[in-house]
Image (spheres, helix red, strand yellow):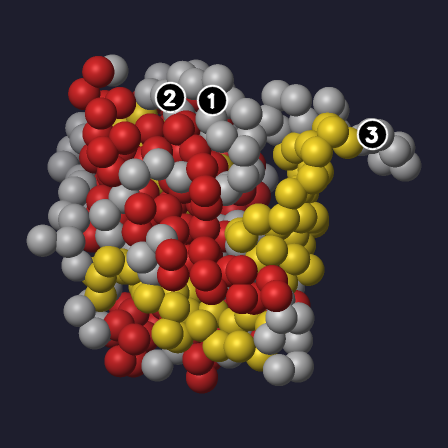
Amino acid sequence: MTRRIVVVGSLNADLTIYCERLPLPGETVHGNGFAVNPGGKSANQAVAASKLGGTVSLIGAVGNDSNGAMLLASTEGAGVDVSRVRRSADAATGVAVIAVDASGENNIIISAGANGTLAPADVSADAFDDAAVLCLCLEVGLETVEAAAKTAHDAGATVLLNLSPYAEIPQSLADLSDVLLVNAHEASMFLGDAEMPHPGAHASAWEPARSQFAERGLQRVLVTLGSHGSVVLDSLAASGEQISRIAPTKVNAVDTTGAGDAFTGAVAARLAAGETLAEAAAFASVAAALATTKKGTQAAYPGAEEVLGHLRIS
């Protein structure tokens, strides 16, 4: 039986402009479409996990404005419990300004807004009753992230930390994190600008990185490699099974915005269902790839049957 997933963090209104190519510094380019969509890493992760069969609760903050109402409607409409999302009277809902080019690549600027008001006091112990997994990212304050991690850890939940947007974290937070999810660039920065293997390298090339993460107290790490799939570094696995390469899922990408959040939410959903980290990563690879085949984030996320169907025919 799938146990509950708790997601603590951000909700943003995504202001997205589509264009043929992303502008260079100081350059203006013409757009060919504009949309306002629900987003924010944590809201996206919650929706992704819920659509994939998870029982999900979201803890966050939005403004008392139309963007906040849109975000609450979107997440709740996807089956997420939003009873612990606070409406701030003093801060506007967070915003992300996104440009997406013709190949689906993007750049993003975020303004925290109400997300910046989320505090340790918003994360109470009873929020983690019967929780299997906690999802965290760094779009809210580190103090709040660490408070949530400690409360979830004490409750026996698996703490899944998505180290994005990248920031240095204290060792105390690393020690509370059961699974770290990073891309290759974030992995390199976390390990002191260590050189990462070529994305297509054999699994054995990741042994130095696995060892370095373990030395930092992180025994289970997922490194996403974009179109090259991902790699699972699990120092708690049996000898010979500590490094697993997850093959990429080939699709025609339209918009990569939020694909990492789809991956994170999918991992959480499958860990809550009792799968191994490698099994969860293989499922998440398909979910994230399918999410790029449509514009937007939450509305583009696939359901469990779509992912399972793709796995059956691949």
The structure residue drawn at horizontal position 25% and vertical position 15%, both measured from the top left corner, is 314
Mark 1 secondary-structure assignment: helix
- Crowding near pointer 3: few (<14 within 10 Å), some, many (20+)? few
Task: Give the alpha-carbon distance from disc 1 to disc 2, as whole Å.
Answer: 6 Å
- Residues at discs 1 and 2 in contact (Cβ within 8 Å): yes
Mark 3 secondary-structure assignment: loop
Please give the residue where the numbered disc 2 appears in the rendered image: 248
Q: Earlier in the sequence, mark 1 or mark 3?
A: 3
- Crowding near pointer 1: few (<14 within 10 Å), some, many (20+)? some
**Res. 169 in view:** no
Q: Is residue 273 left or right of residue 251?
A: left
Task: Give the alpha-carbon distance from disc 1 to disc 3, as whole Å.
Answer: 28 Å
Task: Give the alpha-carbon distance from disc 2 to disc 3, as whole Å.
Answer: 32 Å
Residue 36 appears at what percent x and percent y? 63, 48
Please give the residue where the numbered disc 3 appears in the rendered image: 30
The structure residue drawn at horizontal position 21% and vertical position 74%, both measured from the top left corner, is 129
Q: Earlier in the sequence, mark 2 or mark 3?
A: 3
